[in-house]
Amino acid sequence: MTDRRPGVEAQPLLAPAAAVLARLRRSAASEWRQSQIYRWTLRGPPVEGLLAAPRDYRPVDPEMARMILSGRMTLAGETLEMGQGGDPWDTASPSRAFAVKLHRFDWLPGLMQPADPRLRPKATEEALRLSLDWLALFSPITPFAWGAETLERRLYNLVCAAPRLVEIASEVEQRRLLDSLAEQARHLLRLDDGPARAAERATVTALVGATLAGRGPRNLLPKALSATTRALRAAILPDGGLRTRSPEQGMELLLDLLTLDDALHQRQLRIPGEIGRGIDRMTAAVRFFTLGDGRLGAFQGGESASAARVASAVAHDDPSSRVYSFAPQSGYQRMAGRQLQLLIDAAPAAAGRWSTAACAQPLALEISCGADRMIVNAAWSPGAQGPQALRLTDAGSTGSVGERSAGAPLSGFLAAALGPRLTGGARSVDARRHEDETGVWLELTHDGWAASHGLLHERRLYLDFRSEELRGEDRFLPAPKAPALRRRLDPFALHFHLHQDVQASLARDLRSVLIRGPSNRGWWFRNDAPDVALEPSVHFEAGLPHRTRQIALRGNIGRDGAARVRWKLTPVEPSEQPPLAR
């Protein structure tokens, strides 16, 4: 099988004039949205009640309710001590990441499902109090509280909690809460924050329209469903991946669609065909992207997510469903043996407005050994508390040349105006796959180093089903159509980032590395690189950085413009006593 993936679209030259125009438009839109006239356009007929009880399929933190009731709120790895009955809205947040999750109401699902059922009445009362306090303070439209960064998820969390909140609210409180839901939904439908999350915005707006009763929501629903259909058609590829190429974003959109599908079923309304097809395709994609530890491969601005979250996204599907071997439109390859499972990024990163969370890490891979996640990428995501530099090539388990990256996000004024789009990098990736009963062979090549160094990066992988051994070979070759290669010894590096739960030791030969995961099963990482080292690295989970290490294989490009490193991953035999360096 051959899969040649050119870039999705050409990267335009982003002129400063375009950035200035974008900033002017954004500034004018912000001023308009904060005007009383615009606020008046959001109002509609009073909401008359609820017609559905949306189900949130995501698992929750069972201890969140107990903590909040005791006066402590923990979000984004930070804790706010607000005291019992305290006011988080009028208290300085510990960090911006905390403030984002606070205004997204990420704490609300935990209050709706406390671990101790006896806490449910108090937790619901606290949820209503905090929600109404937000309405009192942030009813005026501001860029942060009513912006796309916070509004979409807040609206989802609120509408899912609305049936419980309405049960204990007074008539006046009910009216305030439900009318605000309708206003926020109308505003969300009008926001244009780029195509990357348009499907999520439209889906959440449709969910509000399907849940609320009255003439206003009845008029909102068909508009929102039409917008959802258009956005899904643009975002979802035939193999179930998204145009952004983020596995985690695809899973999260699937969870939103399942909630919308459930609400429409409760109303006995017709489900648009694009929603049903999207659910089917993305369910298959989530299974494809799931490795042996039950979590997703972390690629292109997505994290691995928890195994419980992944399981909830596919719980509606037949567990015996076949998992396909490659995703041709999304541009990923999968290799799976009895113990070893791999995912490989085999396509250029998303381009243009779809690339605001894309990573310049062509041919990056992630590997699980049994139930242990072993080799990973840095797993930077838009919600991660980490710098944009973690979107560069050396933060992925792939090869890099010199001090440059095969693509980089915009920064400074251009990023502020146009978003942190990814520019440069690989324009074409070639993937050839051969598979039989003995194993699977992949040959991959990308041109991300052609412009800067006149080089191609070729990665060959072979998974032997019988010996459960993975053999790899990375080569740098002169690019045939690139400018004349500079005759210098450019340094190269192959990065294999390890999960933070992995222990690694360098053998006495100072070349082989013994790695062990939580199951204590050992694996040898052997290679013929000129220089081998264990170096510091970082891996993100739930937006938080974890210190870890990486295996770095280093050398220099030869004067003929070529270099090669062979490596393999093999299981340690039970009787083997690994000779380790002191």
Image (cartoon, rainbow, N blue to C red):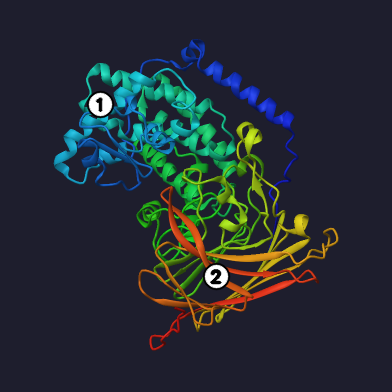
Q: Which x, y percent locates residue 126?
A: 23, 31
Residue at mark 1 to residue at mark 2: CA–CA distance: 54 Å
The residue type indicated by label 1 comes to: Arg
Q: Nearer the viewer, residue 558 or 348?
A: 558
Q: Which of the numbered marks, if any, corresponds to residue 533? A: 2
Report if residue 442 is visible in the image: no
Q: Is residue 82 left or right of residue 263?
A: left
Looking at the picture, does residue 399 appear above or below residue 281? below
Query: Which quarter of the figure has residue 51?
Result: top left
The residue type indicated by label 2 comes to: Ala
Q: Which of the numbered marks, if any, corresponds to residue 418? A: none
**Which residue sits at x=46%, y=57%?**
296
Looking at the picture, does residue 393 appear above or below residue 167? below
Q: Which x, y percent locates residue 184?
A: 43, 24
- Which image quarter is the C terminus in? bottom left
Total marks drawn? 2
Q: Residue furthest right?
A: 484
Q: Which x, y percent locates residue 268?
A: 37, 36
Q: Residue furthest top?
A: 37
Q: Which residue is mark 1?
A: 129
Looking at the picture, does residue 417 appear above or below residue 532? above
Q: Which x, y percent locates residue 69?
A: 21, 36
